[in-house]
Amino acid sequence: MDRDPDTSPTTAHDPAPDGNGSPYRVCFVCTGNICRSPMAEAVCRAELAAHGLGAAVVVDSAGTGSWHVGEEADPRATAALASAGYHRPGDAGEHEARQFRRGWFDRYNLVIALDRGHERSLRRLAPSPAHAARVRLLRDFDPAVSDPDDLDVPDPYYGGDAGFAVCLKLIEDAMPGLLAEIERDLDQNDRAANGGVNDPTEGR
């Protein structure tokens, strides 16, 4: 039986409470937080670092269910990341699967679902319509996707290495669009913090 997301015990890997001056926060969510969402987390962190935004954005991942809570990322996921040159989320034992909780919505600017089932579950879990609006579908950020029935990153768990390679490719294809969205949000936040006044150094 799944644990209640509101009463599950806090772990050292849970997100820190939000507060003034907190960085922009993104959480990728799949089913068990051992395959798709850790892969998306690793790719997003790499892309943010490459764009000079690594210090401005905190990236996490979680699952909709508690089946794998406390486990490391699937070795096939970490192998696919390593073969593509990404940091393996299992390195140094830093990945520990978690279940996304209702109380976490206030801590994230974006909650990115890996498929439409996750999207529905997260929006049902959200405490308000405003919180539900923070839930986005990853492949919605891929401009090459034209079929509304082709928006899922398929679960590779029950397949072989090829499925993880496909999963990684779909994540990579959506990442530029997601980063553009994050950059727009960061820019809007900066303008709001400056009272709507443009940064005089912009464009230099």
Image: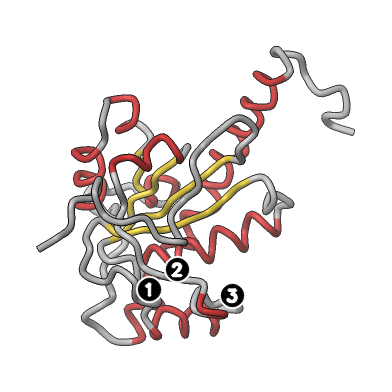
Residue type (three-letter) at the residue carrying disc 2: Met
Q: Residue at x 46, y 71 (%)?
A: 95
Badge 3 crowding class, 10 Å Cα cut-off, few under 14, some 14 to 19, many 20 or more, is some
- Locate residue 176, reporting x and y percent: 56, 51
Q: Residue at x 39, y 63 (%)?
A: 37
From the viewer's perspective, is 17 left or right of 133? right
- Locate residue 153, reporting x and y percent: 31, 61
| Residue with the mark numbered 1 | 166
From the viewer's perspective, is 107 left or right of 198? left
Name the N-terminal-most of marks 3 and 2.
2
From the viewer's perspective, is 97 left or right of 43? left
Q: CA distance from mark 3 to mark 2?
A: 10 Å
Quadrant of the snapshot with the C terminus: top right
| Residue with the mark numbered 2 | 39
Q: CA distance from mark 1 to mark 2?
A: 12 Å
Q: Residue at x 69, y 50 (%)?
A: 55
Name the element at disc 3: loop
- Locate residue 178, reporting x and y percent: 51, 46
Q: Quadrant of residue 1?
A: bottom left
Q: Residue at x 55, y 82 (%)?
A: 82
- Locate residue 147, reporting x and y percent: 27, 49
| Residue with the mark numbered 3 | 87
Residue type (three-letter) at the residue carrying disc 3: His
Badge 2 crowding class, 10 Å Cα cut-off, few under 14, some 14 to 19, many 20 or more, is many
Residue type (three-letter) at the residue carrying disc 1: Val
Name the N-terminal-most of marks 1 and 2.
2
